[in-house]
Image (cartoon, helix red, strand yellow):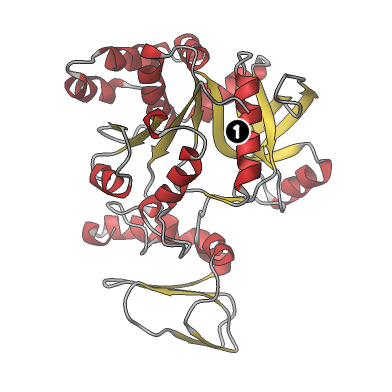
Amino acid sequence: MDLSDLHVVIPAGGAGTRLWPLSRARRPKFLLDLTGDGRTLLQQTWDRLVALVPAERVHVVAGPAHADGVTEQLPDLRHLHVEPSPRDSMPAIGLATAVIAREHPQAVVASFAADHVIDDEDAFQHAVGQAAAAARTGKVVTIGITPRSAATAFGYVQAGDPLPTDGAPDARTVRRFVEKPDATTAEGYLRDGGFSWNAGMFVTRADVLMGHLARLQPTLHDGLQRIAAATDDRPAVLEQVWPTLTRIAIDHAIAEPVSLEGGIAVVPGTFGWDDVGDFSALHGLRGQDDAIWVDADGLALSTEDTTIAVVGIPDAVVVHTADALLVTTLERAQEVKQVPARLTAAGRDDLV
């Protein structure tokens, strides 16, 4: 597996509002040890990626409120790009890619979120190797996760014809990306067998990505190039240019339009993957907790020295912190995001 030209980008953003009150605006989920393994999600991502490339080829993009937390948790990080404000994934990934392309225009750039959990690292490395090989041919490549269920919380990727490539025997063209489906549609995707979960993992050459941006998002492309070219006063140029950049996700900026042109490939990711999107997902990842359960089950967490007891409530979720208590159910875990929204509306930003 040749990864000598691989550079990695870790977009570290998002507030993780469905994991409130654990995840907060200033301490989002990627800075937390949610799995109980002693390493935060960001550190787990770092560990996984420096097993593939040296630290000097890893770039992290984060907001100013999280920069100190990132550098504290990743003491060996060489490249931290601080985005002045959230503008979605494409500007973040594009910023690091534009900087990489200044010195290594044909480098293979791979983007992996800071807050995902992955099992079977050998299978992960194998998928990255295939993706890098396919990317060298000029394709934008995504790693499609083999679905374990008819999930409605993720988007899907439909694979097309085989795309035989040296080093990537399992690569296929992408027919289309689809948004989060309803349950019936998701069950159809699972039966079809040609669909995989879209985990937002993209691998491509730096010059290919910047070329697509120049054609499809020229204003964004030009702004990123201006920032990357400012080697002497980049922070000042970044502050000036960043607010003018288009706010857009990489799926909408690149993946969807380029897939219609046949420019996207997919390789299978057979490893276990979870985006830890809510407490229901977290329940599936954590082992037995220390709560007292009487004719009840679910997830109970406390950041304090507090014993939690649950009686007669199936699929309960109880989360206790120093300043907040959440009680809900696994079934309604997605609705937790409404709590930070209502706190913000009530002027309680101290709790968000």
321 horizontally vs 35: left or right: left
- At a point 46% along the width and 14% down the height, the residue shown is 210
Residue 259 position in % (x across, y down): 64, 21
Residue 179 shows up from this direction: no
Instruction: Work out whether residue 75 or residue 14 is closer to the camera in this orientation and state it.
Output: 75
- At a point 50% along the width and 48% down the height, the residue shown is 116
Residue 205 position in % (x across, y down): 53, 17
21 horizontally vs 122: left or right: left
How many residues crowd around disc 1 within 10 Å: few (fewer than 14), some, or many (20 or more)?
Answer: many
Residue 55, picture quadrant: top left
Q: Amino acid at mark 1?
A: Val
Residue 333 position in % (x across, y down): 51, 63
Instruction: Work out whether residue 122 or residue 304 is closer to the camera in this orientation and state it.
Output: 122
- At a point 60% along the width and 52% down the height, the residue shown is 119
22 horizontally vs 249: left or right: left
Point out the image quarter for the C terminus.
bottom left
